[in-house]
Amino acid sequence: MKTNIGVIFGGRSTEHEISVISASQAMAAINREKYDVTPIYITKQGHWYTGAPLFDVKNYRHIPELLKQCTEVYMRPVYGDYKLYPANPKGFFSSSAMKPVGKLDVVIPVFHGTNMEDGIFEGVLQTIGIPYAGCDVLSSANGMDKITMKMILRANDVPVVDYVWFTDKQWHTRRNALIEQIEGTLGYPVIIKPANLGSSVGIGSAHDREQLKARIDDAERYSTRIIVEHMLADMQEINCSVLGDCDDYRTSVLEEPIKSGDFLTYEKKYMGGGKGSEGMQSSQKRIPAELPDDVTKEIQRLAGETFRVLSCHGVSRVDVMIDRTDGRIYVNEINTIPGSLSFYLWEATGLSFDKLMDELVKLALRRKREEGMKTVSYDQNIFNLTGGAKGGLKGAKA
């Protein structure tokens, strides 16, 4: 019997559509002679659907019509229950009310952005106990939050640019003091980012005080935590993918995104539209990046070290920056579920997309086996032990 892979995507995220694209690519790459695939699409309202029409990305142009052809489902938050149940059975007391519509063996989450990639959904999978590919709750959360991530990297001697961070409430109550801190610590220009979004959502650059205030006002629409970073005047962006777990991983060849201006905004990346737009379909990459061997090796080392200290798992992409003025290298961020799962970097490294998906399944199953070797609870009930209730009012730690 084939292993049934549940590919789960979509969700309540500003990067919803990007997730659909990445998942469609991933599902098309899975070897159907070896695996069965169950697509599970989560709407922007949080409803789960499955059905064959979800395989075709063209069907997402008309979501209401698409969902009419699919079955709404859910998974019970019960450890060990990997079944999909119909959310709207024909009769509450009918025999089909709790009859599953399918059973998964392993899950590959292909989410991007807040509420999905940041550890929240990984917690759901962990509660159910189903094997799943990618980072766990902790590494997903740390990788998604740019502030926490940079704190961890800096504490482990991984170079990052100088930054200032604060909350939206602090921005409203201590605006002038924060502006002075930013100008005194970082100067101009700077990059302003919501702490926990990807795909350049809410990101903007500022070259003076008025721009700074406007960009922060925009960023706080998306997140309660804001980070302002020193902006390199002459910067070269390089990306490297990492595959494995924090104890055993390998790095891909490097890519250099070719872009105009400071950076590509979300609108330019995904909403450009039309002939000659700067959307992802027309973005250019130099693979492999044309760099000296020693620089290439150092970037791969830093990418692997970032993956390791954040305890990552599965496939990630680490984005670094080279300061052309002095050659220094800084880690910008990690994408714990990278767009298109970075398949193009692995193909250039010699690993085909179907083999990449196979590796993710193997990693998920291996982690599940290793977790099963750890003690998570005791069979005995301490309340049945002699004197177990004695002194109970003193509390568990008394």
Image (cartoon, helix red, strand yellow):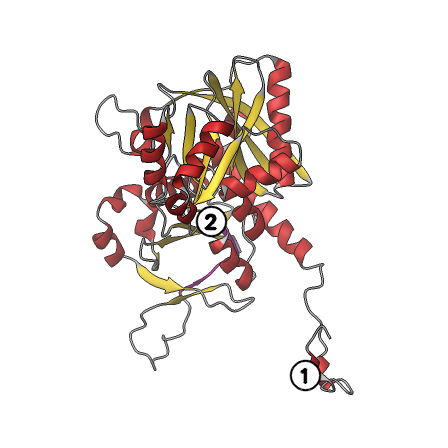
Q: CA distance from mark 1 to mark 2?
A: 44 Å
* Residue 17 left/right relative to 38: left
Q: Which residues are magenta?
A: 101-109
In magenta stretch: residue 234: no
The image shows residue 74 at horizontal and vertical percentages of 40, 64
Q: Residues within 10 Å of mark 2 (few under 14, many from 20)?
A: many
Q: Are marks 1 and 2 in contact (CB under 8 Å)?
A: no
- Quick one: SS at disc 2? strand
Placement of 54 over or under 244, stated as above or below? below
Q: Nearer the viewer, mark 1 or mark 2?
A: 1
Q: Is residue 150 left or right of residue 273?
A: right
Q: Nearer the viewer, residue 104 or 260?
A: 260
Give the number of callouts.
2
Residue at left offset 43%, top offset 46% = 170
Amino acid type of disc 2?
A: Pro
Q: Is residue 85 visible?
A: yes
* Residue 357 x, y percent position in the rendering: 51, 41
Q: Is residue 174 above or below residue 387?
A: above
Q: Is 167 on the left or on the right of 334, as rendered?
A: left
Task: Please state, as top left, top right, bottom left or bottom right, where the C terminus lies in the image.
Answer: bottom right
- Of residues 108 and 121, which is closer to you in this image? 121
Q: Secondary structure at mark 1?
A: helix
Q: Residue at x 49, y 43 (%)?
A: 144
Q: Does residue 122 lie above or below 90 as drawn?
A: above
Question: Magenta segment, principal secondary structure?
Answer: strand
Mark closer to the chain start, 1 or 2: 2
- For disc 2, the marked residue is 109
Measuring from the top left, give residue 215's x and y in whole percent: 34, 34
- Residue identified by numbered label 1: 393
From this viewpoint, which residue is outermost toward the right? 386
Identity of the residue drawn at 36% across and 28% down: 209
